[in-house]
Image (cartoon, grey):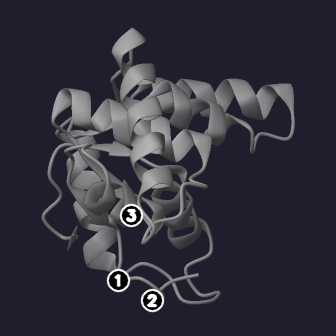
Amino acid sequence: MTSTPLLPAALLDWSAYVRVALAQTRPDRGRRLSRGSLRAFEDAVRENRLHASPPFRVEALYSARTAAEFSAFSDELDGLAQTRGDADTWLLAERAQRELAEDPAANHRISFPDLLIASIASQYRLGVLHYDSDYDLLATHTSLEFESVWIAPPGSVD
């Protein structure tokens, strides 16, 4: 587990992206990301080290309230590097879910997008930038190989 400001090449998770958006649009409300974390995020985007995946896009686009918002947000996400899964992604996700179910110390009730994002990250040897403990669970209790990268320390931001 690592945290910013030095972000590796990573897939984005909605939990991290929404915290960036909140820090940019409502910096004075609640506990927000630090300027250093925002700067590291922006640098990683500029350097094509942050990737969007289909499960992230679907989860992110769900937040759009109108067709115009959907289009604008989709265009914004198109500006990120794109990493797609394939048939092996589904096999990796199923194996990881089985491993969690077989591990008495783990909970196999991981969200579907998280499971797919972690599987894609493992396939392409990318990290996952997030604010969600499910990724630590997947990284430590399954054979998926990816770096779990918190955008901020757990519990530190809203």
Q: Is residue 52 among the parts visible in the rendering?
A: no
Q: Quadrant of the C terminus?
A: bottom right
Q: Nearer the viewer, residue 60 or 118?
A: 118
Residue at 45% x, 67% y is 104
From the viewer's perspective, is 71 left or right of 158? right
Q: Mark 3 or mark 1, which has the lower sequence index?
A: 3
Q: Describe the element under mark 1 as helix, strand or loop.
A: loop
Mark number, residue 137: 3
Residue 22 location (% of width, % of height): 58, 68
Q: Describe the element under mark 2 as helix, strand or loop.
A: loop
Residue tagged 1? 153
Q: Is residue 147 among the parts visible in the rendering?
A: yes
Residue 14 location (% of width, % of height): 54, 51
Mark number, residue 72: none
Residue 109 drawn above or below residue 125: below
Residue at 54% x, 55% y is 108
Res 47 quadrant in image: top left
Q: Alpha carbon of mark 2 to alpha carbon of mark 3: how far? A: 19 Å
Q: Describe the element under mark 3 as helix, strand or loop.
A: helix
Q: Are marks 3 and 1 in contact (CB under 8 Å)?
A: no
Residue 42 location (% of width, % of height): 30, 54
From the viewer's perspective, is 42 left or right of 1? right
Q: Nearer the viewer, residue 120 or 66?
A: 120
Q: Nearer the viewer, residue 42 or 130?
A: 130
* Amino acid carrying mark 1 in the image: Pro
